[in-house]
Amino acid sequence: EAQVTQNPRYLITVTGKKLTVTCSQNMNHEYMSWYRQDPGLGLRQIYYSMNVEVTDKGDVPEGYKVSRKEKRNFPLILESPSPNQTSLYFCASSPGTFRETQYFGPGTRLLVL
Amino acid sequence: RKEVEQDPGPFNVPEGATVAFNCTYSNSASQSFFWYRQDCRKEPKLLMSVYSSGNEDGRFTAQLNRASQYISLLIRDSKLSDSATYLCVVTGSWGKLQFGAGTQVVVTP
């Protein structure tokens, strides 16, 4: 089944404890992206990747890192999480460019205490 | 000012009625426009792309007004299953996507 998977789906952690949220797609998509969704603010783009080894900052990259070593995987790393990073996170991919349909993963709910 | 703005609603719509709402965007260089649907904070799913000449997909009609920098979505013959949050998406500078905060639609029996 063609899909975007994220793990974990739910995570409660404490301030400063490094964590990684994985994202994987099995559709051979070129473009991948991370978003966070907060009430009243909509989805905001954190980082995106046009292809392997090519990543760029979105609108809210502070406090996050990403890597794209393989086409299928695009992990999101929080080196030192803070409570203001409590949010719902979505990974998405699209076949070619960012102008095509985005296929979203199921989301990761993160609570930083 | 936000890059993409939507009326948050909710728009309460009787079943069978028509509802329409807009989304305004600030970047005149934006080239691609979409409507996504999101149910109860689940993952967004593409509803339809928005083309310059306007386009229709069943009961849904999308329009683009470049001069006034807004896109619209019209839902005819609303069904209970149309209850959702509708997200407006606009492409920004290369690689970037900007989302509106969403318009909530509630279809009532």
Image (tube, rainbow, N blue to C red):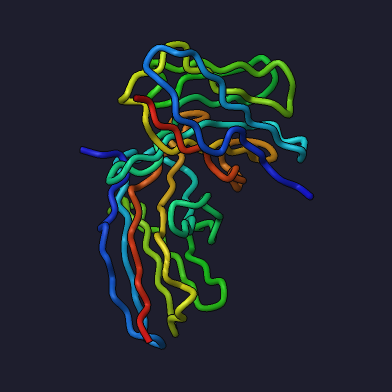
Residue at x 55%, y 22% (from the top left corner): A76
Which quadrant holds the N terminus of chain B?
top left
Which quadrant holds the C terminus of chain B?
bottom left
Number of disc labels:
0
Above or below, B70 against A56 in this view is below
In terms of depth relative to the viewer, which is nearer, B78 or B61? B78
Above or below, A46 against B31 in this view is above
Extreme left residue here?
B1
Q: Is residue A69 left or right of residue A10?
A: right
Q: Position of residue A63 (x, y in %)?
A: 40, 15
Residue at x 46%, y 40% (from the top left corner): B91
In terms of depth relative to the viewer, which is nearer, A86 or B91? A86
Q: Position of residue B79 (x, y in %)?
A: 46, 81
Residue at x 32%, y 44% (from the top left corner): B4
Residue at x 28%, y 75% (from the top left corner): B12
Q: Position of residue A83 (x, y in %)?
A: 32, 24
Above or below, B98 against A46 in this view is below
Q: Is residue B64 left or right of residue A47?
A: left
In terms of depth relative to the viewer, which is nearer, B67 or B41? B41
Q: Position of residue A7 (x, y in %)?
A: 61, 33
